[in-house]
């Protein structure tokens, strides 16, 4: 009989879950009534840029904001920005007016007001700029009801030590191991294969310093596709983790190569930048690699603590991983941040 973890992985890889987890990129904006309209992000805004939405004009003051269908971007002299879709990104340069049209299409207006399409600077997976009615999925979540029906319950039991990564589907074959720091004596960490018992001798117990281990420092072998693993943490011989700490590599070879290609394309286009890290996090989330997406989102939220986009993305990752306390804490941070911004506008 297959183990509970194997059954849960099967649920995770079911067709229904793939439909939900495969939604291109992922962002939940700060107001629930806007979630179904977000199509793209505005990144790297520089200079005098205004956003016109529903006939209301406002100045751009954030480095990362969501865009909706029919949004107009007015760029002044020497202003520049990027519009990033799930499949492509566009480089904008002022002085000009641009319009967001459909899932992956941008128009530019000339001096006479006539509009024409803008060619994307880079295509991911060859999707390119498309017409507004091409049927591509928007930059939105699947319905909450669908997620609740198909989400695998692999994080149901509360462990004595909360593992942060790796958990569930994992892209890296040599992942960074992290957990919530706990007080007490010396911890020991190991990995157990549920498929290949003979390989377990190659994962000796490690005594870490702190709550993080780089895989390269362990001497452990590289993870194998098709295997199921448990991260084990113990103290004084008592195991502090259970089946909730299971993980496995993306084991569909085509999906793995596609994700690998996407991440490489993003790194080439946005090397060592917040934009690149955010897009990588979205690609990982799309593939169901929530723990690795959370690691990137946590770093982004730490570097830009007043950016609600990063905080909401981090909250979504925590929600998918079942970290209820973190979700509630982030909800309060976001509400406080937005409240402060509203007060600033009223003054």
Image (cartoon, rainbow, N blue to C red):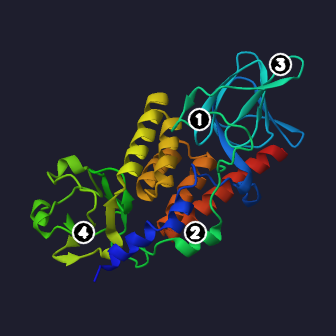
Residue for point 38% across, 69% down = 9
N-term mark: 3 or 1:
1
Q: Tell me how far mark 3 sits from mark 1, CA to CA.
A: 23 Å
> In the figure, 71 relative to 154: above or below?
above
- Marks 4/2 in contact by CB < 8 Å: the verdict is no
Helix or strand or loop: what does disc 2 sit on? helix
Disc nearer the start of the sequence (2/3):
3
Instruction: Give the distance between the C-alpha atoms of the residues marked 3 and 4, in whole angstroms.
Output: 62 Å
In the figure, is residue 32 to the left or right of 19? right
Q: Residues within 10 Å of mark 3 (few under 14, many from 20)?
A: few
Residue 193 location in percent, x, y?
21, 67
Distance, label 4 to label 2, CA atoms, is: 30 Å
Q: Of the residues under marks 4 and 1, which one precedes in the sequence?
A: 1
Residue under label 1, please give it.
Answer: 88
Disc assigned to residue 225: none
Crowd class of label 2 (few under 14; some 14 to 19; many from 20; radius 10 Å): some
Residue, disc 3: 110
Give the labeled residue for mark 4. Answer: 233
In the rendered structure, which disc, 3 or 4, sits on the residue that comes first in sequence? 3
Q: Looking at the picture, does residue 16 appear above or below residue 61?
A: below
- Name the disc covering residue 147, or none: 2
Q: Position of residue 91 (x, y in %)?
A: 63, 25
**28 on left or right of 172:** right
Up/down of 11 relative to 130, above or below: below
**Disc 3 secondary structure class:** loop
**Residue 97 falls in image quadrant:** top right
Residue 322 seen in the figure = yes
């Amino acid at each position: 009989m297959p183990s509970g973890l194997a059954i849960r992985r099967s649920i995770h890889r079911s067709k229904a879950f793939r439909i939900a987890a495969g939604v291109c990129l992922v962002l939940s904006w700060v107001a629930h009534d806007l979630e179904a309209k977000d199509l793209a992000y505005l990144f790297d805004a520089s200079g005098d840029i205004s956003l016109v939405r529903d006939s209301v004009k406002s100045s751009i003051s954030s480095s990362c904001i969501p865009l909706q269908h029919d949004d107009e971007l007015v760029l002044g002299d020497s202003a520049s920005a990027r519009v990033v879709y799930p499949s492509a990104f566009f480089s904008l340069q002022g002085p000009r007016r641009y319009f967001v049209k459909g899932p992956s299409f941008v128009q530019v207006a000339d001096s006479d007001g006539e509009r024409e399409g803008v060619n994307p600077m880079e295509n991911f997976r060859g999707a390119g700029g498309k017409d507004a009615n091409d049927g591509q999925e928007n930059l939105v979540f699947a319905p909450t009801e669908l997620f609740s029906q198909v989400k695998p319950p692999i994080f149901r039991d509360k462990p004595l030590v909360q593992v942060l990564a790796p958990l569930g589907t994992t892209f890296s074959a040599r992942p960074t191991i992290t957990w919530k720091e706990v007080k007490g004596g010396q911890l020991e960490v190991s990995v157990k294969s549920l498929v290949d018992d003979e390989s377990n001798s190659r994962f000796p117990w490690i005594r870490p310093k702190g709550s993080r281990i780089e895989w390269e420092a362990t001497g452990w072998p590289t993870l194998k596709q098709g295997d199921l693993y448990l991260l084990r943490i113990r103290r004084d011989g008592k195991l502090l983790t259970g089946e909730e700490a299971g993980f496995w590599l993306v084991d569909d070879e085509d999906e793995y190569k596609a994700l690998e290609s996407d991440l490489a394309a993003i790194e080439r286009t946005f090397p060592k930048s917040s934009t690149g890290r955010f897009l990588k996090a979205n690609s990982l989330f799309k593939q169901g690699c929530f723990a690795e997406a959370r690691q990137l989102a946590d770093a982004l939220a730490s570097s830009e603590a007043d950016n609600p986009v990063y905080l909401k993305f981090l909250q979504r990752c925590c929600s998918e991983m079942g970290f209820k306390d973190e979700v509630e804490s982030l909800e309060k941070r976001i509400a406080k941040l937005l409240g402060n911004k509203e007060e600033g506008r009223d003054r």
